[in-house]
Amino acid sequence: MKNLILLLISLLLLSACKENTEKKELITEKTADSIFLLDSKWQNQDGKELQLKDLKGKNLVVAMIFTSCQTACPLLIADMKKVASKIDPKKLKETSMVLITIDPENDTPEVLKKYAQERTMYGNPWIFLRTDMESTREFANVLAVKYKKITPIIFSHSNIISIFNKNGEMVSQEEGTVNAEAVAKTVNGL
């Protein structure tokens, strides 16, 4: 009888260990899709160096732009501002509105800062980022944003707004003309 009890306890412990291991594997698998795993170095509009993992803990609404753009980017900027205005104020405190340049050669931190200030997008929740060309291309690929340099200051590019949860996992994307209500609803639901 004593051996039977020990056997049952051992089986219960093994089962609990297996369940715990499966949960850890699920968590690891889930966070494997996180943008926070990218180890590239970035600069914000104030010249501060950071990595994407430094943004962890906030929901992210992300678009890729370039400051000399006269066509699609002003529309993306207007969409991002509209989205920010529709996010619940409590949720907006938990959210960063991130604009990443596809033209890091020309969009220096000083240029990004001036651009942000001129559009009243300086300070929380707004973050403008730049990195090297290779890391920019890598991040664009993660977002499925396509871009091509047409002239030294003109790019053809996709218009996509992506939403990431606090763990850096993509939860939604809007392409083309953005439905600000839908994007804000998604962020409000995180």
Image: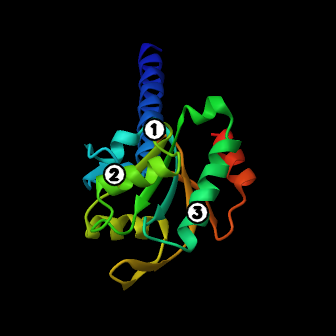
How many other residues sit within 10 Å of disc 3, few (<14), some (14-19) or many (≥20)? many
Viewed as shown, does residue 51 lie left or right of 125? left
Residue matched to label 3: 76
Q: Is label 2 or label 3 in front?
A: 3
The disc label shown at residue 37, or none = 2
From the image, which quarter does the C terminus lie in? Answer: top right
Viewed as shown, does residue 169 lie left or right of 104? right
107 up-or-down from 148: above or below:
above
- Tell me where residue 117 appears, x and y as whole percent: 45, 47
* Residue at x-position 54% and y-position 33%: 94
- Tell me where residue 33 appears, x and y as whole percent: 44, 55
* Residue at x-position 53% and y-position 67%: 73
Q: Amino acid at mark 1?
A: Gly
Q: Secondary structure at mark 3?
A: helix
Q: Is label 1 or label 2 in front?
A: 1
User: For this rendering, which residue is in front, 12 or 129?
Assistant: 129
How many other residues sit within 10 Å of disc 1, few (<14), some (14-19) or many (≥20)? few
Residue matched to label 1: 123
How many other residues sit within 10 Å of disc 2, few (<14), some (14-19) or many (≥20)? few
Q: Amino acid at mark 3?
A: Leu
